[in-house]
Amino acid sequence: MAEFRSLIPFGRTLARSGYDPFSGFRQEIDRLLEDFGRDLPAALSSNKGGFIIPKVDVAETDEGLELTAELPGFDEKDVSLDIHDGVLTIKAEHKSEREEKDEKKQYHLVERSQGSFLRRLALPFEADADKASAHLDKGLLKVTVPRQASAEKKPKPIPIGSNK
């Protein structure tokens, strides 16, 4: 039986010599992708500023919608909520500044950080925005959006007639 490598016209000399012209290229691409992904979670965290991606849990119940978002470090004044055209919008912006000074050690440190968060959710039902409520406690935002109260819709029978 013939060896399969002998069927590849340009592969015989490369395979025997041990040289692969694409191995260096492949290693550089792997290194580039590793470097790109390494600092991605840190860049999105609130420690360095920029956009914050908090965990959000959404549940639709018989009464309406229940949403829970993790917003550590945010106060009530930092968060705004609204319902417009069937879309719930959660917006949060956090800014902090810290200053340390020590004359004996001769240093002065000023750190500033900020982050913002915007999330829009299309509501799968007609919401009663007047009865919606939200509560922020220890960095956990809980939002309840009830369904619009509507009259009980009963099926309307359609009479069947004949063409006589």
Image (tube, grey):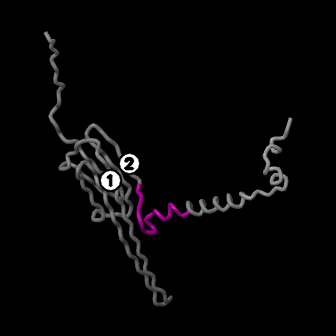
Q: Are marks 2 and 1 in contact (CB under 8 Å)?
A: no
Q: Secondary structure at mark 2?
A: strand
Q: Residue at x 26, y 41 (%)?
A: 125
Q: In what quadrant of the picture does the C terminus appear?
A: top left
Q: In what quadrant of the picture does the N terminus appear?
A: top right
Q: Nearer the viewer, residue 50 or 145?
A: 50
On the image, numbered disc 1 is attached to which residue? 120
For residue 137, the mark is none
Three-letter residue code for mark 1? Arg
Q: Residue at x 82, y 50 (%)?
A: 12
Three-letter residue code for mark 2? Asp
Q: Nearer the viewer, residue 99 or 82?
A: 82
On the image, numbered disc 2 is attached to which residue? 57
9 with respect to 71 (left or right):
right
Q: Residue at x 41, y 56 (%)?
A: 54
Q: Which residues are magenta?
A: 38-54
